[in-house]
Image: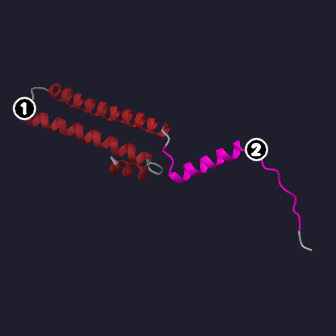
Amino acid sequence: MNFWQEIYDAGKDRRYGMLFFGTFLAFLVLFFLGLLFCAVTGANSLTDCVYPALAGMGVFVLVAMWRLVRQVRKQRRERLKSEKLSCDELAKARSKLRNRLRPPMKKLPDIDLKY
């Protein structure tokens, strides 16, 4: 998954149009490959080839959408989780709490005891 995310991250800011047309071209190529496969297998009419190709593309789109929804939900759940604090962070937080609960000490005046 990281591989595909890196490919998308590299082009998402600059090339949305290229990304769209590349995906559209890939779908068309898959569709025509499906039609070619049906023609080679000896289908009786064009509709015998088109409907299975469209059904295959529909299944592919549904699976891609389902994966996208699952990924978005996972990211949302992980964003709301808070990470555990390290030992240093816990110590610092405890010291802040202790210092707040303690009444402020009266500052003694500076007395210079030099004679």
Query: Which of these two is toward me, 102 or 6?
Result: 102
The stretch of residues the image draws in magenta is 83-112
Vertically, is 107 above or below 52? below
Query: Which of these two is toward me, 90 or 83?
Result: 90
SS of the residue under disc 2: loop
Q: Which residue is mark 2?
A: 103
The label on residue 42 is: 1
The label on residue 1 is: none
- Mark 1 closeness class: few <14, some 14–19, many ≥20 residues within 10 Å: few
Query: Which of these two is toward me, 6 or 111?
Result: 111
| 26 horizontally vs 52: left or right | right
Q: Residue at x 43, y 39 (%)?
A: 75
Find residue 46 and report its horizontal and vertical position in percent. Answer: 16, 28
Vertically, is 42 above or below 98? above
Vertically, is 58 above or below 26? above
Vertically, is 39 above or below 25? above
Which amino acid type is shown beneath numbered disc 1? Gly
Q: Residue at x 39, y 46 (%)?
A: 19
Marks 1,2: beta carbons within 8 A: no
SS of the residue under disc 1: loop
**Residue situated furthest left in the rendering:** 42
Task: Tell me which corner region of the image, top left, top right, bottom left or bottom right, holds residue 69.
Answer: top left
Find residue 34 and report its horizontal and vertical position in percent. Answer: 18, 36
Q: Is residue 64 magenta?
A: no
Task: Tell me which corner region of the image, top left, top right, bottom left or bottom right, holds residue 113.
Answer: bottom right
Judge depth for marks 1 and 2 and give the one in front.
Answer: 2
Q: Residue at x 20, y 29 (%)?
A: 50
Query: Which of these two is toward me, 79 or 61?
Result: 79
| 57 horizontally vs 10: left or right | left
Labels 1 and 2: the sequence-earlier one = 1
